[in-house]
Image (cartoon, rainbow, N blue to C red):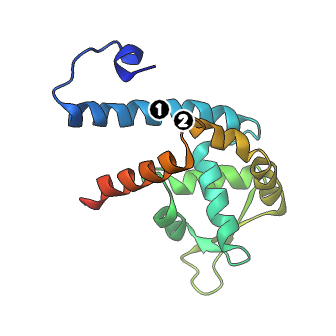
Amino acid sequence: MSLEKDIKQAKFRNEHHKGAINLIYTYNWMMERQKAFFDIENITPQQFNILRILRGSFPQPISTLQIRERMLDKMSDTSRIVDRLVLKGLADKKTSITDKRLVDISITEHGKEVLERLDQKHDKMDAILENLSEEDATLLNALLDKIRDKG
């Protein structure tokens, strides 16, 4: 289906305007599908992102600031999300040995198990872009990188 039909808007100022609206609409469309994927493990996309960051740094713990720098959604309240992961037993939080003002965050075995189960279902995540060929996906990635190159 086309953007015009989906949002019932026939005219845009120009193709750049349409492209910006299309990106926003497509982002929200993708998030709806991802939510169903993450609901399987009772986590949010932001929690998933933090768990992946923690797994990537494992066995080294990292600070909340380091997590925030690596997050896809820079507007997320990292501390609050980490606290929820700790309550769920997916992450561990300890005062830093080297600097008592900092908190070290690490992934737990349970957190790694959750990611492993989601990794095994990667086909559901990849299916969001299944209408694209490998070449299309490469072009999409290049175009998205080009958009962000402007600064």
Placement of 16 over or under 55, stated as above or below: above
Position in image of residue 13 (x %, y %): 16, 26
Compared across the picture, whether 108 is left or right of 24 comes to right
Residue at left offset 26%, top offset 14%? 10
- Disc 2, disc 1: CB below 8 Å? yes
- Please tell me in which quadrant of the rendered image residue 90 appears: bottom right
Q: Position of residue 96 (x, y in %)?
A: 63, 79
At numbered mark 2, what does the secondary structure look like: helix, strand or loop? helix
State the residue lying farthest toward the left: 13
Q: Amino acid at mark 1?
A: Asn
Q: Nearer the viewer, residue 102 or 151?
A: 151
Seen at 71% across and 56% down, the residue is 86
Q: Circle 2 sits on which residue?
A: 31
Residue drawn at the location 60% of the way across and 54% of the way down: 49
Percent coordinates x, y for residue 113 in the rendering: 83, 56
Crowdedness near tag 2: few (<14), some (14–19) or many (≥20) residues, C-alpha within 10 Å: some
Q: Quadrant of residue 4?
A: top left
Measure the alpha-carbon separation of dots 2 and 1: 5 Å
Left or right for 39, reference 148: right
Q: Is residue 104 left or right of residue 30?
A: right
Name the mark on residue 126: none
Residue nearest the observer in this picture, 60 or 98 = 60
Q: Amino acid at mark 2?
A: Met
Q: Choose top left, top right, bottom left or bottom right for residue 53.
A: bottom right
Q: Which residue is mark 1?
A: 28
Quadrant where the C terminus sits is bottom left
